[in-house]
Image (cartoon, grey):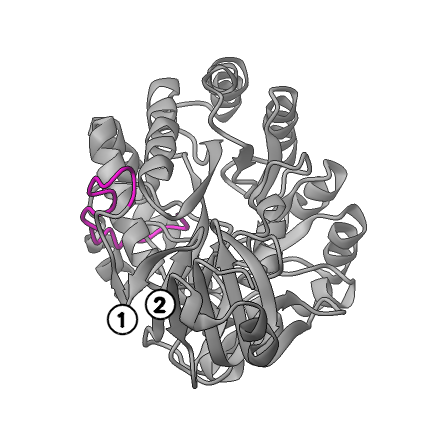
Amino acid sequence: MPDADLVVHGAAELVVGPGGGVRDLELVEDGALAVENGRVAAVGPTDGVCREYPPERAGKTIDATGRTVLPGFVDPHTHALFTGDRSDEFVARIEGKTYTEIMEAGGGIPVTVEAVREASEDDLVDALCGQLDVMLAHGTTTAEVKSGYGLDTETELRMLAAIERADERHPVDLVPTFMGAHAVPEDTDTDEYVDQVVEDQLPAVADQGIAQFCDVFCEAGVFDVEQSRRVLEAGREHGLAPKIHAEEFSRIGGAQLAADLDATSADHLLQATVEDGRALAEAGVVPTLLPATAFALGEAYADPEPFLDAGAPLALGTDLNPSCFVHSMPFVVSLSCLRMGLGPETAIRGATHDAALALDPGDGTGPLADGAGTLAEGTAADLAVVDLPSHVHMAANAGTNRVDTVLADGDLVVADGEVLRGQWAGGEAAIGGDASDGAGGDGA
């Protein structure tokens, strides 16, 4: 009988991955899995797996009795790379100030842009790794990270370089997205700035070769549909798959644009309609909902039903940014059930496999190709052990981190709820940094 590097056994419930419909999961009671060379070698009922891979002969074992084992969470939408502090805007929002009022008073994205422009690349790497530590402790093993707080070529490239370095240094697998069209710099005409993004930033980003996606904030008062189309089409010409912030505060046609362009995902969608849901489903665009943003900004929550009824897989993400300081995908799962009416199976699927779909550029290079969001034979051994007896208990447990153990590529990276350090990158202290509290008051 073969020996395994690691065997997880006795799980009260093991989440394998998606079930038959867009709302379903495949679950195994009294489940187990074996890991060899960072990959899942076997998964199924404990008796069968342990006959083939006896725990007493494994390099390591994890007794998951009474606990839930599920794929590592995939966070498909974050602005996790930022510096500076905007806690004054948090207070202003509590006092009733609107997004526009905060911007007119000199707050919002420009504050973060100024701080990021002043930061060195080392500063940015440390800041991002600090955020990733917290995400990892909550079970996230794959995350998208956007640029977009530079708004000039030099800083956007520095942000992407920092994302690449953090990816090399930290166990969370990172997917870099270029978002030079996140906002319009102060005292700049929007069309002129779009020219800069298309003619200057995108060619430099393509030459750098780090970003996998191009994103744009398609929103009234930011980039309209035609400006957004121009950015995304130029991005595609430079080899970057399109993603889009759409229909967040107003419905201006961003979801339809995503469908027209066969974008990988359309995100936010608070104002989307049944028509938008059908268009996205027919085009194969993954709707990505971000309930923590509505929670943080006091907005109405997106309605998931138009997308699910149309047969689209539904992804969930944190939208971690200076005004949505949420790192926890389990909290997002709970919030989507409590405030958007998702069933626990649909929510957990949306935070794992379907979130990985929202990061699939369609060329076989995304995390989905490595099996992210699924625990099946041959996939990367990215998983979280939750100290609760079922996926329903996990979804119902809002506000407390019950993630006990995390594996990334088969390596133990969280144990007893604590992030382990100094076990990656040839023994160097590979993770750590300050997760600075950047609470503020705009959409990102």
For disc 1, the marked residue is 416
Residue found at x 48% / y 17%: 196
Q: Residue 203 at x, y = what percent?
A: 52, 15
**Dividing the image into 4 quarters, which one contains the N terminus?**
bottom right
Q: Left of 398 or right of it: where is 133?
A: left
Q: Residues within 10 Å of mark 2 (few under 14, many from 20)?
A: many
Residue 405: mark: 2
Residue range of the region highlighted in magenta in the rendering: 424-444
Q: CA distance from mark 1 to mark 2?
A: 6 Å
Residue found at x 39% / y 48%: 172
The vertical placement of 393 against 377, above or below, is below
Q: Amino acid at mark 2?
A: Thr
Please tell me whether mark 1 sits on a helix, a strand or a loop: loop
Depth check, front residue: 211 or 423: 423
Q: Residue 161 at x, y = what percent?
A: 36, 27
The vertical placement of 138 against 250, above or below, is below
Q: Amino acid at mark 1?
A: Asp
Q: How many marks?
A: 2
Q: Residues within 10 Å of mark 1 (few under 14, many from 20)?
A: some
Does the segment drawn in magenta span residue 435?
Answer: yes
Residue 227, by quadrant, is top right
Q: Residue 323 at x, y = what percent?
A: 33, 54
